[in-house]
Amino acid sequence: MALNYFQPLFDVIRDKDRCIKCQACARQCANEVHRYDGDLDKMISNSQQCVDCQRCVCICPTSALKIVDNPNKFRNNSNWSQQTMTEVYKQAETGGVLLSAMGNPKEYPVYWDKILLNASQVTNPPIDPLREPMETKVFLGKKPKDVTFNEDGSVNTETTPTLELSTPIMFSAMSYGSISRNAHESLARAATELGIFYNTGEGGLHKDFYQYGANTIVQVASGRFGVFKDYLETGAAIEIKMGQGAKPGIGGHLPGAKILEDVSRTRMIPMGTDAISPAPHHDIYSIEDLRQLVLSLKEATEYKKPVIVKIAAVHNVAAIASGIARSGADIIAIDGYRGGTGAAPTRIRDNVGIPIELALASVDQRLRDEGIRNEVSVVVAGSIRSSSDVVKAIALGADACYIGTAALLALGCHLCRSCQTGKCNWGIATQRPDLVKRLNPNIGYERLVNLVHAWDHEIKEMMGGMGINSVEALRGNRLMLRGIGLNEKELEILGIQHAGQ
Amino acid sequence: MLEKEGQVRIPAGCAISGFISRDGNRICGDKIVKSISYMHDRSNGLGGGFAGYGIYPEYKDQYAFHIFYDSNESRVETERFLDRHFDVVNLSRIPTKKHPRITNEPLIWRYFVTPLPTKLAASQLDEREFVAQCVININDRINGAYVFSSGKNMGVFKAVGYPEDVGEFYRLDEYAGYAWTAHGRYPTNTPGWWGGAHPFALLDYTIVHNGEISSYDANRRYIEMYGYKCNLLTDTEVITYIFDFLNRKQKLSFEDIAKIIAAPFWSEIDSGKFSESEKQKLKYFRNVFSSLLITGPFSIILGFDGGLMALNDRLKLRSMVAAEKDDMVYLASEECAIRAICPVVDRIWSPRGGEPIIVKLNEKK
């Protein structure tokens, strides 16, 4: 037998006194970790297959299961970590590119955690959201440069199309194909109930979900999957995906195994073929080409829908954003390097792009310096983990936030980061019917609604503490922020002072 | 060392007062001094000031610049700038009276100027924009010079001290105007800089303000996109620029400006109390000028050529009282400041939060 270089990452610990051999774990685990041996009358675990998705732990009626890190360690080495070494073994064996899923998990700084919020004391009263109105409604889109007046002298109230959000949170782009039909349905229904928007991602829009069109952002990506007239006309806004925070500079690849009948029809590609999105849009090789696509999409939809351009946060993001603001786009979405993905090459995910906090701060400032901040709204994504991240993002200058990973967590995801295997035990990142049906959209949508409601309450509490009763007065209000443990350069880029100043 | 205003943001509580004769009768400046003096305890001696309208009838077609100088050098440099851009019709020190409680005064000069026609034409700006840009230029670029009043037939007088002392110092009993506003300051942290006292002015717009706005940085970063420089980091400064931007540049009425900076809540907009067209307008304002919504407590009196406007924040977190007597309208933080100069009024009331009071001179018959 060949040597096994790969030690299991996890140990499956089963408390034999508690286990009643009901075999629920065995039935639930798509990775086939658990099985019942009838001859021995014993539950047996193959921890080699375990991804630590916690499904069995959650399902076990007697709490007999625990998944823990495998304590087995290679010899300590500050330079060569066990993970790095294991990756070398893996590539030596397969000759392939390493694949990963979800956002960059490495120990880079999280700037949200180094920013603190203000609160009112004495000179200015805090406002109690239980007693006074507290407003979180926002509009996304272009603002007219100057007020114009009608012939009778009244204000001309026409504007270019906008999106109206009840709270500054939207669900990020996640395609049907990368996530399941039930996950999509949960997002669509939650967005509709909440008065916000979800995003189809690049996988087209299932016919059954056209009814949620008023709360849907339809995406046009480099593969153009599922893009046709009805699709564009159904959405409330159109997003051109130029890049994604988890994998800036590269395209996407949905393996043929996930292109089953429904996905194939929605994406408009044959069943079983790989869906490959090229790295660039083949009609966009520069900013002037982007302008043409923006205007073509507007022309196709009679200028009734705002166009979003989504880019990954990269080094010259401010200059790119400035170009986009002048391209005719109404909204810029910026995706930070912590942003999630269904699958990305590990090296790209872990090493390309910049933090969303810094990207946002420099984009907002650059657009203001150029006097074009009102030409576009700015939406940020790429790891907004909580309501306080939202508040900090808005105070730095964002109009709204996209949440992806947090939304999936609400649906049950435990961030095992194995989406690329298609064996999601939570019924989210899979197309296997037996797994998909585990995610009940009636419950899923409710959990999403709960999450956003909870965040909205918390945003209001934090705003009230600052003496702000409307979210627009928070936007770009960097005086409400202070840095902690940040150096001069970081503070300069964020445009904030240090705590104590 | 304490930092000067503009290097650090200083919150302040305050007292404000103002009145106007709708018939345009000119009223002696000692009256406004008396009014604000009754709210002595709302100030702490670190800033007081006044704005008078209609006080320079003999120079009503010239812009009256009131300038603080730290030194003669800054004066020489500024006057060189003024000579390059304006026809200076008259210049002098502003007459003051030594006062034991007003000390460390800068050089205080007054100029009556008109823009040089050639410069104005070359700038391709309208006259008021030209003047505003020159004022912003001086304040931003000339070290030690600060233009604190720049309108026609009006003037601001301010200093570090209690407002009643400031009024005596500037000999306001020697001026008469159809409208006056006053301010007593209670900053929480300042070494006291004369430029930091209120009213704050640009062209004929002056603001006296009581409160501390929580939207400050959102407002500042928006308005600075349009060529304004918020050098003082005070609420009053940014509010003045907002009025200038919305009224002079965007040509919106004062009524509409109130709907932007103290916008009705969505619950009110959607309540059905407004007509469909009004609702559309309110929604348009909240969308387009969302960054000019002012939150946090404020009461302000805006002075402008031909009128006064008073406004509270939409929750009315600061006191403000209004009263009428014949052609006079009085506005103040406290009723006592009105009763002090007009014991018997026809009507007295507290305006609701976000509800503007706009008073203009009656049309001349």
Image (tube, rainbow, N blue to C red):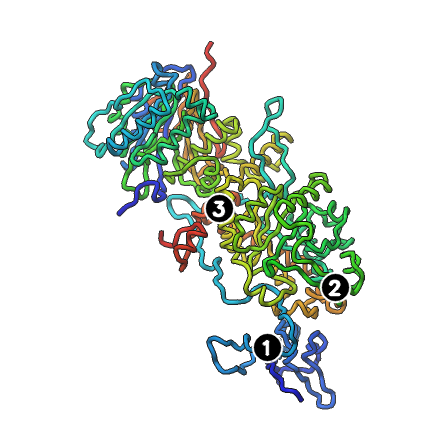
- In the rendered structure, are the residues bearing label 2 and label 1 in contact, judged by CB atoms less than 8 Å apart? no
Q: Gap between marks 2 and 3, in whole Å?
A: 41 Å
Nearest to N terminus: mark 2 or mark 3: 2
Which amino acid type is shown beneath numbered disc 3?
A: Gln
Q: In front here: A110 or A268?
A: A268
- Is residue A172 rendered to the left or right of residue A472? right
Mark 2 against mark 1, which lies toward the viewer? 2
- Mark 1 = which residue? A67
Which amino acid type is shown beneath numbered disc 1?
A: Ile
Q: In front here: B126 or B291?
A: B126
Q: Which mark is residue A274?
A: 2
- Mark 3 = which residue? A365
- Is residue A492 rendered to the left or right of residue B92? right
Nearest to N terminus: mark 2 or mark 1: 1
SS label for mark 1: strand
Image spot of residue A222 (x, y percent): 69, 54
Which amino acid type is shown beneath numbered disc 2?
A: Asp
Is disc 2 in the same subunit as disc 1?
A: yes
Is disc 3 in the same subunit as disc 1?
A: yes
